[in-house]
Image: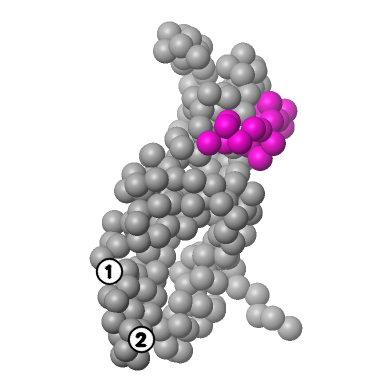
Amino acid sequence: VSKDSLTELAKRMPVLSEEMKSLYVGGVVYFDENGNRLGKVGASDSIRVTTLEDYEIAYQLPLNDSSCEEMGSPLSSISSEGKQKIYSYYVNSYAPNASSFEFGEISDIAQCDTNGKLTLNPFASGVGNENSLISTLQHEDYHLRTISDWQSSGDNSESGIISDYTRKKENELAALMYQINQQEFKDSSSNYKSQIAESIYQTWSNLGMYDKTREDAMALCNVNYTIPE
């Protein structure tokens, strides 16, 4: 994709009114196979890979035409090389403090270590949606910026182990609070917000903040709370 072709495409794109834009927060995010971000179309925030030609077609379709969100292939179905290029775009943009980046089998979307290495699970739930992916990377980048606050002190005494545990959980809570105040988190799905709310509640519990409830965490993340039967 050349700079000139993208510039020419921008000239032909319809201009949406602010009112119309407010109805369609997000949009399917299209990339080409070389990791070039083509743009957003529609109301979803899934990440898909297509050609510039098909992206142009999608952009010209009415916003209520679901086919504008179905061009190309979902990110999960492309080659590892293609995934690497696209995820590198997001890591470089939203976790710039990572010293290295690799794929790995972890339980979360992403996690970092005290050496600055960021590991990302390309098959995790939510990793193929832009807002949840960015929100997770913003969380991890907070950890990367504050490594000295949570890395091990090397003190293997009982008090040292307890201190290290507390500092790590305090840093996790700070990262969560930073994360939920970013716009990408606010625009993410209710399912993702619920997962983060549960992480906040569990971290409160780990820190002995027993006056805080799961309902408090859900409210903090702007998610409706249903009392279990």
Residue 88 rendering spot, x and y as whole percentages: 46, 37
Callout 2 amino acid: Ile
Q: Which mark is residue 162?
A: 2
Residue 172 rendering spot, x and y as whole percentages: 39, 69
Q: Nearer the viewer, residue 207 or 156?
A: 156
Residue 105 rendering spot, x and y as whole percentages: 60, 55
Q: Residue at x 26, y 65 (%)?
A: 148
The residue where tag 1 is placed is 149
What colouring style does the render use?
A: one colour
**Residue 82's image quarter?**
top right
Q: Residue at x 58, y 41 (%)?
A: 45
Element type where label 1 sits in the image: helix
Q: Residue at x 34, y 56 (%)?
A: 115
- Mark yes or no: residue 86 visible: yes
Q: Residue at x 45, y 35 (%)?
A: 89
From this view, report whether residue 50 is shown above or below residue 75: above
From this view, report whether residue 206 is shown above or below residue 221: below
**Which residues fall within the magenta stretch?**
66-84
- Mark yes or no: residue 132 visible: no
